[in-house]
Image (cartoon, rainbow, N blue to C red):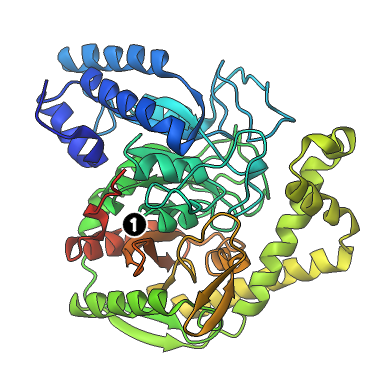
Amino acid sequence: MNDFVLHRLTVAQLGELVQSRQVSPVEIAEAFIDRATKLQPTLNAFITTTYDQALAKASLAEAEIMKGDYRGPLHGIPIGLKDLFWTKNVRTTSGSAVTADFLPTEDATVVAKLQNAGSYSIAKTNMVEYAYGGAEHNDLYGAPLNPWDLECVTGGSSSGSGAAVAAGMVPLALGSDTAGSVRSPASLCGLSGLKPTYGLVSKYGVTPLSWSQDHVGPMAKTAEDLAIAMDAMVGHDPRDPSSVYRKPESYFKGLSTDISNLRIAVPSNHIWQVMHPEVRKAFWNAMGALEALGAKIEEVEIPELDYISIAQVTITLAEATSYHAEMIRARPNDYHPGVRRRIETGFFLPANAFVDALRVRSLMERRWNELFATYSLIATPTNPIYAPKFGENEMRTQDGLITTRELVRLTRLFNPNGLPSASIPNGFSLSGMPIGLQLTGKRFDDRLVLAVGHAYQQVTEWHKVFPAI
């Protein structure tokens, strides 16, 4: 056995150990399964575990590597999958009693691509029912607990993925993001998380919430790990109508992009209306660090943000109700009351409200294009607050009360137009809870978003701090 604390290593570090044969895939699998077995009763990060299958796949990966058939940095690396990704012959509940016994006959495209890269799943991670919520309790499976404070939420809806990676139960996990469901738990759990450009990663075999705003993204400790995952995940899929073809490019190699002289826009309106002062301070400290790296930070007024925020909520409501209409009429009592209430509200949504939301999205597309003609990135805090406690509806600050319903008010701005957006660890509150920095680029500029996140992590240590659990 080795002397490494494997559950604290990044995907990149684990991959180097596997490639150099200092550590075997089986040793890695055993270490993470031991860690997960120890913490699952406390954190409740998983819905279904596949430990035996994981050990078998780790053994197969080890045999391949010993024969010289090394597939790359994900070969022999365990991952977690949010429980709305289809997994062949492994139940996929989407966090709901309605589909508690759904057994897919094939893998989601992105799951298959990660397996082709040599990784394997050890568990299906817990989630808010049908991904419709930011911090709600799951009545059927219970809520995952935040490893930094067991009384606090992890953020959602990829709540189990956030808890699992933060606690070292897996080094990498997949989530989905419709209003911030990758970035928000990444921020609240002290992780890096990416919502890629819409259409880059296939959604085939992924239970939808809002077809036109759903994104599949990775969560890990570092931007470097996100880039490694993206190299395996991206690719055109004819089975996904929203999938786009792009000339192959390495996200990992893109991390070396020079970020000096980049112009980064900070919205001067909307985001500061509701903001915890500790989050605000951490954000401006980050802007100072990016300036020291050569970036130019400029405040810019974007009045349309108020409208695109409302449009995102409206589009989600319409599309979620469309998807769930038949099921919720047949089995209304099997839905979580809060999720049921949202979906049923969609039956009363006026058609003109949906059309107006689509028009706002089209107008915002023009506004983003104008903005990115001048600026390379937009920077904001990921969330206006850090993780609230369970049942806490308001957070008291020196500036007054902030409702916890504001949790995703900054992340949802970038879903309607499919912009790439990442959350990067950005310090801690006075109470020791993680805070996130959100970096957003123009469509298909995912490599630049990750490069700036990576550069920031070269001059900070936030991603190297672990919860005491």
Q: Label 1: how many residues lie within 10 Å, few (<14), some (14-19) or many (20+)?
A: many
Residue drawn at point x = 66 percent, y = 49 percent: 132
Q: Nearer the viewer, residue 438 or 134?
A: 134
Q: Is residue 368 left or right of residue 5?
A: right
Q: Answer yes or no: is residue 375 visible.
A: no
Give the number of callouts: 1
Residue drawn at point x = 51 percent, y = 52 percent: 153
Q: Quadrant of residue 361?
A: bottom right
Q: Is residue 81 left or right of residue 467?
A: right
Q: Could you tell me which quadrant the N terminus lies in?
A: top left
Q: Answer yes or no: is residue 370 visible.
A: yes
Q: Position of residue 224 (x, y in %)?
A: 26, 50
Residue drawn at point x = 83 percent, y = 36 percent: 333
Q: Position of residue 272 (x, y in %)?
A: 50, 82
Q: Which residue is mark 1?
A: 447
Q: Position of residue 14 (x, y in %)?
A: 20, 34
Q: Could you tell me which quadrant the C terminus lies in?
A: top left
Q: Nearer the viewer, residue 264 or 457?
A: 457
Q: Secondary structure at mark 1?
A: helix
Q: Position of residue 112 (x, y in %)?
A: 46, 26
Q: Is residue 69 above or below residue 426?
A: above
Q: Is residue 399 above or below residue 211?
A: below
Name the kind of residue labelled 1 in the image. Arg
Residue drawn at point x = 35 percent, y = 55 percent: 190
Q: Nearer the viewer, residue 197 or 425?
A: 425
